[in-house]
């Protein structure tokens, strides 16, 4: 069950990290997908989608700079306690692209079958 306070804090953390990405304070090609804050506010799971290659290296470098990012998040969100940031890869975008590709392949196969059936009907 999600709590409104943790959702609000998660959104604020997401805004701050997104701003840092846009301004170039974080130099990685990532797309921030979501932030989940645990109920006791000790941890925030930051789900990212990595654009390009080197997923493990990018996540490792983000985890190395988690202290700096946490300090900046604390400065901008004005929380009494800033959660520890844990960066995880989110595969939802990749899975969505793969699903669309599979749907397109099925649609093309069905279209080919319809064309074959139409040509067989014309021949008969």
Image (cartoon, rainbow, N blue to C red):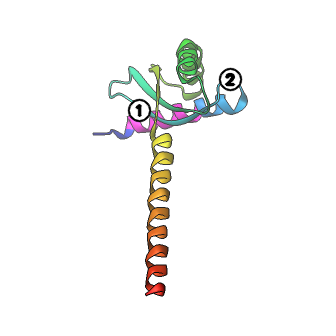
Indicate the quadrant containing the N terminus: top left, top right, bottom left or bottom right: top left
Classify 71 as above or below 31: above
User: Residue 29, image x and y in percent?
Assistant: 64, 29
Mark 1 or mark 2, which is nearer the start of the sequence?
2
Residue 27 is tagged as: 2
Q: Residue at x 49, y 58 (%)?
A: 104
Tag 2: Cα neighbours inside 10 Å, few (<14), some, or many (≥20)?
A: few
User: Residue 46, image x and y in percent?
Assistant: 47, 28
Q: Residue at x 49, y 37 (%)?
A: 11
Which residues make up the magenta segment? 5-16
Magenta run includes residue 101? no
The dominant secondary structure in magenta is helix
Classify 113 as above or below 22: below
- In front of the other: 84 or 21: 21
Classify 118 as above or below 1: below
Q: Secondary structure at mark 1?
A: strand
Q: Residue at x 45, y 52 (%)?
A: 102
């Amino acid at each position: 069950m999600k709590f409104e306070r943790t959702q609000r804090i998660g959104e604020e953390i997401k805004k701050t990290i997104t701003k840092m990405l846009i301004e170039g304070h974080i130099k990685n090609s990532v797309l921030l997908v979501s932030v989940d804050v645990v109920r006791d506010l000790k941890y925030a799971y930051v789900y990212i989608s990595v654009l390009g290659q080197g997923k493990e290296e990018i996540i490792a470098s983000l985890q190395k700079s988690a202290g700096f990012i946490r300090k900046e998040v604390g400065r901008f969100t004005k929380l009494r306690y800033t959660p520890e940031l844990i960066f995880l890869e989110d595969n939802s975008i990749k899975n969505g692209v793969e699903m669309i590709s599979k749907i397109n392949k099925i649609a093309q196969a069905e279209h080919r079958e319809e064309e074959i059936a139409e040509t067989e009907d014309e021949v008969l």
